[in-house]
Amino acid sequence: MSLDESIRNKYTVVIGLEVHAQLLTESKLFCGDSTAFGASPNTHISPISLGHPGTLPKLNRKAVDYAIKMGLACDCQITKENIFARKNYFYPDLPKGYQVTQDKAPICVGGKVWIKPKGAIEEKAIALNRIHMEEDAGKSIHTEDAMDTLVDYNRAGVPLIEIVTEPDLRSADEAYSFLTEVRKLVRYLEICDGNMEEGSLRCDANVSVMLKDAEQYGSKVEVKNMNSIRNVHRAIEHEAERLILLLEKGETIISETRDFDAGSGTTSSLRTKEELNDYRYFPEPDLSPLIVDENWIDEIKVQMPALPRELYQKFVTEYGIPDYDAQVLIDSKEVALYFDALCKETQNYKSASNLVMGPVKSYLNEHGSSIDQFSISPQRLAGLIKLVDEGKVSNTIANQQIFSKMLENQGSDAQAIAEEENLIQESSSENIQPIIDEVLSELSDKVKEYKSGRKGLIGLFVGEVMKRSKGKADPKKTNELLQQTLK
């Protein structure tokens, strides 16, 4: 599907997201069944999670802690008196015939998530409508036989928070950025692993389009079954174009739920959109109201870690590193904290950033390990930066030879390795000048060209001296001596 740019520019795309994050509790929201991923089907179930008659739910306090954490991270107002509700609908993976959720009194109200899409200059605040708690449904498994569907209830009752935005997003790029930020937040807070591929982070997108000068939103379509952030982007792009083409043809948009096919990059109709009254919400009679007082909120505030936006601002303003570096470093909480610790050991923040983004991350990616398994402490790495700053070794020698030796010899510092391997840079004129004289003698033709105006050849001479000194000659001193000799 392709759409002429002039036609697309006539319309505004309006997007609202509903993001479900599966909370990293050991047990389910209302009973003690395990939430561990990957178990054999229907082994993490009990009469409570299956809704047998006579059973009573009991709320998981840890899940409430995690919901409050997310609310505080998003500047939400925390609701003091929370009431759970039954959302009634019939579907094979819902064993009780209803889902326990929050309707009128979500635990978090309002709030925002800051995004900065790729290429954007300014940040944009995406307003949240609410964050509420609810239990997950089971999982339907469709077999090759179209008439045969299996159901695994292990996931039924697993605690979720649903993060609902206002219709503030205006492009697939903004939706991509929002989801990336939410995933980053839940990982920093350690309340969800954020793995969309495993279903622990899921997203539904409500998409509508309207003419640029219109005052009312168009009919919205909900898109489901997108198992990666990239697929959310693809689905929104496709759906926006499909809706615009329908309007251009004079057709009416039906408010419906559509399924995204990752293979073809297209959507197809599942069902017409439900209205709220279709769910027949009513207060959950088996759960008393949940009261969240200020002491509880204060306890959670004490546990809050530094958040990605806070670290980004610190890295850019306090450490003065470029925007790109800061964005890369805060992508992982552990990497960001390692970099922050490294900056407490050195004043050369840009070199610290280059090392972490370059050799350190390359090593971690190559070995499939995380920074908490990395054998070089921030203190030892700062020693490597100091060697370069003092002109004792070149960046190349530091990043390649000494860094590798530090990985092999966990007890040795950079200075000791440099001395042991005879890598300390030579800055004495007496030792560098003979090599310069030898190089210029052998490259006499190039010397004539240099003197006739080809000043760029100085790089060739420096490179040759570095090669013959096996990288030990101080490049700055070499350049200085070469210019004096070539006068």
Image (spheres, helix red, strand yellow):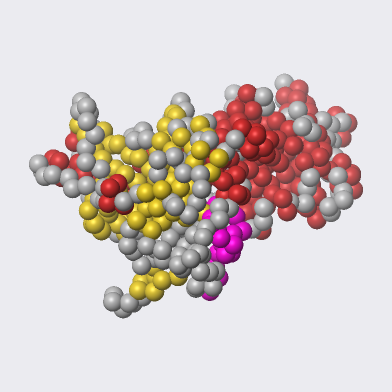
Q: How many marks?
A: 0
Task: Name the residue rendered at 89%, 44% in the picture.
Answer: 416
- The residue at 31%/52% (across/down) is 279
485 or 219, which is in the foreground? 219
Q: Is residue 375 above or below residue 41?
A: above
Residue drawn at (21%, 37%), measured in percent from left and top?
218
Q: Is residue 7 visible?
A: yes
Magenta: main secondary structure equals: loop
Which residue is at a point 45% across and 47% down the rendered structure image? 84
| Rendering coords of residue 15 (x, y %) | 33, 39
**Residue 125 vs residue 450, the one in the foreground:** 125
Start-end of magenta stretch:
22-40
Question: Is residue 294 or residue 366 the one in the foreground?
Answer: 294
Q: Is residue 473 left or right of residue 76?
A: right
Q: Quadrant of residue 128?
A: top left
For this orientation, the residue located farthest to the left is 250
Q: Quadrant of the C terminus?
A: top right
Q: Position of residue 442 (x, y in %)?
A: 73, 39
Tell whether position 270 is magenta.
no
**Residue in front for this viewpoint, 31 or 318:** 31
Q: Residue 186 location in percent, x, y? A: 55, 45
Kindly tell me whether residue 195 is visible in this rendering: no
Q: Say left or right for 241 vs 184.
A: left
The image quadrant of residue 246 is top left
**Residue 256 image point, x, y percent:** 24, 51
